[in-house]
Image (cartoon, helix red, strand yellow):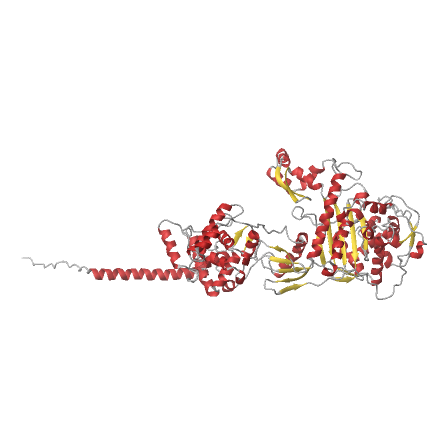
Amino acid sequence: MSPTVSRSKPSFRAKPNRPERFAALTRTLWVLFGAGVVGAIFYVFAVSVNLFNLFGSMPNLKTLENPKSELASEVYSSDGVLMGKYFRENRTPVGYEDLPQNLIDALVATEDSRFEEHSGIDAKAMVRVAGGVLTGGALGKSGGGSTITQQLAKLLFRTREDLNDGKLNDVPGLRMLITKTKEWILSVRLERNYTKREILRMYLNQAEYGSNAFGIFTASKTFFNKKPQQLKLEESALLVGLVNGPTWFNPVRNPARSRKRRDWVLSQMRKYQYIDDATYTAAVAKPIKLDYKVENQNEGIAPYFRVEVSKMLRSWAKETDHDLYADGLKIYTTIDSRMQKYAETAVADHMSLQQKWFDAHWKGQQPWRDENGRLIPNFLSTSIKRTERYRSLQARFPDNPDSVKYYLNKKYRMKVFTWKGGEKEVLMSPMDSLAYYKRLLHAGFMAMNPLNGQVKAWVGGINFKYVKYDHVKQGKRQPGSTFKPFVYVAAIDQGYSPCYQRPDVATTFPAVAGRPAYTPKNFEGSFSGRTFTLRQALARSMNSITAWLVQKLGPETVVAYAKRLGITSPIEAVPAVGFGSSDVSIYELAGAYSTFVNKGVWTAPMMVTRIEDKNGNVLREFVPQTKEALSEETAYLMTYMMRGAVEEQGGTSIILRGGFKFPYQMAAKTGTTSNYSDAWFMGMTPDLVCGMWVGGEDRSIHFRTGAYGQGSRLALPIYGIFMKQVYKNNKEIGISTGEFPKPAQPLSLEIDCSRYYGGQRDTIPYEQKLNQADLQDIDKEDI
């Protein structure tokens, strides 16, 4: 009998009762929740420190405490007037006290109604956003989740542009999550570092409003021509409404949409009880009334001057690690806003008249002519090849000249500069436009204080918006007879007296090294044979006596004196040097002439006095650059010599006493090139030296006769119109009406030349007869 094996019954674990199951589930949930919290904390920590460079950079504490926004640098005149700005983003910050309450209320009601209750993150809004995502929305598109502080973080630190350089940022679905996490972290940090008022101020100063307006100050000025504190309720609502869609809600381009958005902002203000029903009803009934003007760098005071200053400032900024277009610098210049206005008005008044005469002079004809007065063939077709439009068409149609020609002759609607109303919309082709602008006369004008070098007025052209080329420093042309003082100062410095006499006879430079013999002629084309003093010769701008001096001194000596007096352009030492055969700028001539007034001390033209940072700390102060170039006596004698142009009978600038009736001491020099392509004038008083040029863009475009094209007719009146206003307001702007100061020591040379005239008054030469006759034609406003 086999043994019996006993088998026990299988045992089963007893099922836990319901309370036990619930407790276990609870423990599991707590574990998962704890793990989630720890994971979230670790994730936030990892993002904040950019663990293993997975999430991209974050601002450090220093950056957080001093967030940098782009601020426009401002340029001021010497009398404290804002002239213009340098910017990429046109932003000027304002303080909280400059913000109206209705603007603050509109912002909070629209963007973050619980702004005062949270610490950077609005939990209720987050729940709403999460619900939106769970029901099919997308992160960042559910709406209403970002607080004002989070939006500020996004604006200040460019979280969606600059902080997306981590390894995980390119993973689909993670980029926005990481970005939003950074904004949450930064908003909490901002709330710890700044008060609620400071956050509101920073937000309104940082936001973009469209139309190149960054910050509430620029936005208020752009759309309403007001300061922020002057904004009305409905205006504040409109600007707040712009923040979420600067282009979409632009009141100029989309007025109906903009008004609807404004009214919604007002309804939010009513909803959160910032305004009552009556105020709301009255506000939404009002139409949008704009005073709209986009601020740009074509406008403002002295735009040509500001461009030239920017060249120097960019060099300084590079050396000192500053950003001219973003650091909010304050640049204080030497320009006097009143004198600048007089100069701009003088150029505009005179040039509009000259253009009218020029158009009549060439009516029915094309003005581009060669030295013999013959029409230059293919002038426009050659000139168009130097334009940007031609180059772009060539790149677009490299092997298709017919297409290039087609588009160059296709007519478009465009605006052009005119002297009537500033600009006009016309139907023109690029070739038509080129021909139109080639017919315009251009001008440059500069005024500076010779005693300290400060530039007081600078007009680089006829209209900066349409003609950017600067004719003060950038442009260089043959100066004609305005170069003669360099000949005469060399003569005076080497012992010649203003009363030294010389006959008006021909002087011939012999042929050398392939250069033919050269006999300069006087303006009227003949020689009188009569004797003149050097003062008379310079006053009448006589070529014969100037040529004799160049021959006696040598062209090299003339060049040396020009260089000593600050001329930096290349000057060729040839017999014609004394008649301005080498190109120079108004800027150079004004600085050189100032040496005569400033007792022989050359002073470089000075444009900026100091630079401050955005907090008013002085970063750089500028002092005049000077050098002794002449003796005090030589400088005074030259001033006396050039007074002859205004005082001597037959002087080329006698119109200043006759037509303009100036009773004060003035010194002057006119200049005209041989074919009238360049007309110049230089004028001097004890504390103001002015230089000006008038001519065509191309040297082949000019008047055909001296009756219209000489310096005393085409350039001098600008000076007269300008000085008329300067003298009218001389006490206000501090300009002297006194005489040129004499040297401290007695003169070693005789300057009273009256005994050489023998009581006989000279007849007026042809050039001066033209000046007097022209008085009949000059507009009353020009005198």
Percent position (x, y) of residue 33?
Answer: 32, 60
Which residue is located at x 14 percent, y 58 percent? 10
Residue 352 visible in the snapshot: yes
- Up the image or down, 154 lies above or below 441; here it is below
Residue 56 visible in the snapshot: no
Residue 201 vs residue 677: left or right?
left
Q: Nearer the viewer, residue 432 or 359?
A: 359
Q: Nearer the viewer, residue 773 or 479?
A: 773
Residue 560 vs residue 47: left or right?
right
- In the picture as drawn, the residue positioned furthest to the left comes out as 1
- In the picture as drawn, the residue positioned furthest to the bottom comes out as 744
Q: Count up the numbered dots.
A: 0
Percent position (x, y) of residue 292?
Answer: 57, 50
Percent position (x, y) of residue 558?
Answer: 83, 54
Percent position (x, y) of residue 433?
Answer: 66, 39
Q: Nearer the viewer, residue 529 or 756?
A: 756
Residue 16 vs residue 685: left or right?
left
Q: Nearer the viewer, residue 567 or 697?
A: 697
Which residue is located at x 67 percent, y 42 percent? 386
- In the picture as drawn, the residue positioned furthest to the top comes out as 402
* The quarter of the displayed image where residue 376 is located: top right
Point out the image quarter for the N terminus.
bottom left
